[in-house]
Image (cartoon, helix red, strand yellow):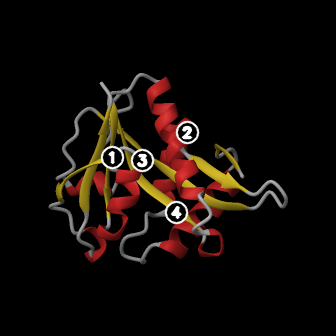
């Protein structure tokens, strides 16, 4: 499995299609949001690609923030961000159902952590569904609290991984 930054607009569309497959219509990001994340935070917009078929099967991306507070609904909409923020906020990690439970989400997450540390950010913040809390804890994230956000009708939970 190759983890790499997204390159072309077609790859952004393929990544978006995975998002739409994995998340509900109400909670999935828009194609415009994906395009903005590629344009502004390109090094953090990663895809997982099969080495045998070069098929994109996973995606992660997000935005930078200058704070760790995730209570503002505009964060989930990615309308609030800081180009030079000290924290990376993961807005999606999605793996196509046909390739789930093969370590792809873990590989994407590990690479995002590595990039954020290389860029000397202070840490990573995110909101996840309850069933994913233990997944993030296995990767060093700390549970903070239930989020005030109910984006897409989902009860989100705030987590972070701070190293500075």
In terms of secondary structure, where does tag 4 sit? strand
Q: Nearer the viewer, residue 5 or 102?
A: 102
Residue 141's disc is 1
Residue found farthest to the right: 52
Count of numbered circles in the view: 4
Image location (x, y in percent) of residue 155: 23, 70
The quadrant of the picture occupied by the C terminus is top left
Q: Nearer the viewer, mark 1 or mark 2?
A: 1
Residue 7's disc is none
Q: Residue at x 22, y 69 (%)?
A: 150
In terms of secondary structure, where does tag 1 sit? loop
The residues tagged by marks 2 and 3 sit, at their Cα atoms, a distance apart of: 23 Å
Disc 4 or 1, which lies upstream in sequence? Answer: 4
The residue singled out by tag 3 in the image is 139
CB within 8 Å, label 1 to label 3:
yes
Left or right, 157 with reference to 82: left
The residues tagged by marks 4 and 1 sit, at their Cα atoms, a distance apart of: 18 Å
Residue 42's disc is 2
Residue found farthest to the front: 138
The residues tagged by marks 1 and 3 sit, at their Cα atoms, a distance apart of: 6 Å
């Amino acid at each position: 499995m190759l983890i790499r930054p997204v390159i072309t607009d077609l790859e952004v569309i393929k990544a978006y299609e995975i998002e739409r497959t994995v998340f509900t219509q109400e909670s999935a990001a828009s194609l415009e949001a994906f395009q903005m994340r590629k344009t502004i935070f390109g090094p953090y917009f990663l895809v997982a690609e099969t080495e045998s078929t070069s098929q994109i099967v996973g995606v992660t991306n997000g935005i930078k923030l200058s704070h760790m507070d995730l209570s503002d609904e505009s964060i989930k909409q990615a309308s609030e961000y800081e180009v030079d923020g000290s924290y990376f906020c993961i807005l999606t990690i999605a793996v196509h159902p046909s390739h789930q439970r093969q370590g792809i989400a873990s590989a994407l997450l590990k690479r995002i952590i590595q990039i954020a540390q290389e860029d000397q950010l202070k840490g990573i913040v995110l909101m996840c569904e309850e069933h994913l809390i233990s997944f993030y804890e296995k990767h060093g994230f700390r549970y903070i609290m239930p989020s005030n956000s109910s984006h897409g009708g989902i009860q989100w939970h705030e987590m972070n991984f701070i190293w500075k």
